[in-house]
């Protein structure tokens, strides 16, 4: 099977579950931004130290595939396989709280950077915020499951805390504004 189909050459793409839309459709932007976020997390995971919360980040990547599947599926076509249960959001919150206990208290805005891994995590955080904005834009046009919005909001917080954690463990203080 060839990877290219030529069906998108005129600027349209197929949705999961049927139908075609323009590649500039708000839905495509939303799941495209989530896909970019997933790749940015993969880059952060590949950056040493590669064991920093690896299992957590891999589970996030799996969740983001589910989010992308839901966003690429108008209606309820993929809801059963791609739903994000509340316990996934709770898992992000627990990880944030655990990291918060290890890093110094936050007293100012943190400038992105530090170690290469922290810098990649900060970049993933900003992509997460963009994906969240794109999903909100889609939600203004068509209802999006609320757990997706909550998940992306918590995920950006987690990525911020992971960047702080990596810098802390490397012996670097946050650079503040």
Image: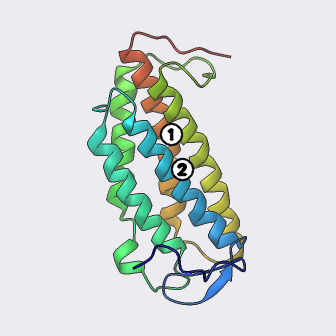
Residue on which disc 1 sits: 157
Depth check: 13 or 108 in front? 13
Give the image quarter of residue 21. Answer: bottom right
Left or right for 176, reference 61: right
Scheme by which the image is coloured: rainbow
Q: Residue at x 44, y 16 (%)?
A: 104
Q: Residue at x 59, y 89 (%)?
A: 19
Left or right for 109, reference 115: right
The secondary structure type at the circle numbered 1 is: helix
The secondary structure type at the circle numbered 2 is: helix
Looking at the image, can residue 102 be seen? yes
Residue 34 numbered mark, or none: none
Which quarter of the rendering shows the N terminus? bottom left
Q: Residue at x 39, y 72 (%)?
A: 82
Give the image quarter of residue 138. Answer: bottom right
Residue 153 numbered mark, or none: 2
Depth check: 57 or 42 in front? 42
Q: Are marks 2 and 1 in contact (CB under 8 Å)?
A: yes
Left or right for 177, reference 104: right
Q: CA distance from mark 2 to mark 1?
A: 7 Å
- In the displayed orientation, state which residue is furthest to the bottom: 18
Work out whether 16 lies above or below 87.
below
| Mark 2 burial class by Cα count in 10 Å: few <14, some 14-19, many 20+ | some
């Amino acid at each position: 099977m060839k990877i290219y189909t030529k069906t998108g050459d005129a600027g349209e793409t197929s949705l999961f579950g049927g139908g075609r839309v323009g590649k500039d459709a708000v839905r495509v932007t939303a799941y495209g931004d989530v896909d970019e976020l997933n790749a940015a997390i993969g880059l952060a995971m590949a950056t040493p130290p590669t064991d920093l919360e690896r299992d957590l980040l891999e589970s996030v990547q799996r969740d983001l595939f589910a989010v992308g599947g839901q966003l690429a599926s108008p209606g309820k076509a993929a809801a059963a396989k791609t739903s994000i249960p509340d316990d996934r959001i709770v898992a992000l919150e627990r990880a944030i709280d655990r990291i918060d206990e290890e890093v110094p208290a936050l007293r100012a805005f943190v400038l992105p950077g530090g170690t290469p891994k922290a810098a990649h995590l900060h970049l993933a955080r900003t992509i997460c915020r963009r994906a969240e904005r794109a999903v909100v834009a889609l939600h203004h046009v068509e209802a999006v499951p609320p757990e997706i919005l909550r998940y992306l909001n918590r995920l950006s917080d987690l990525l911020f805390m992971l960047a702080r954690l990596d810098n802390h463990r490397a012996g670097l203080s946050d650079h503040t504004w």
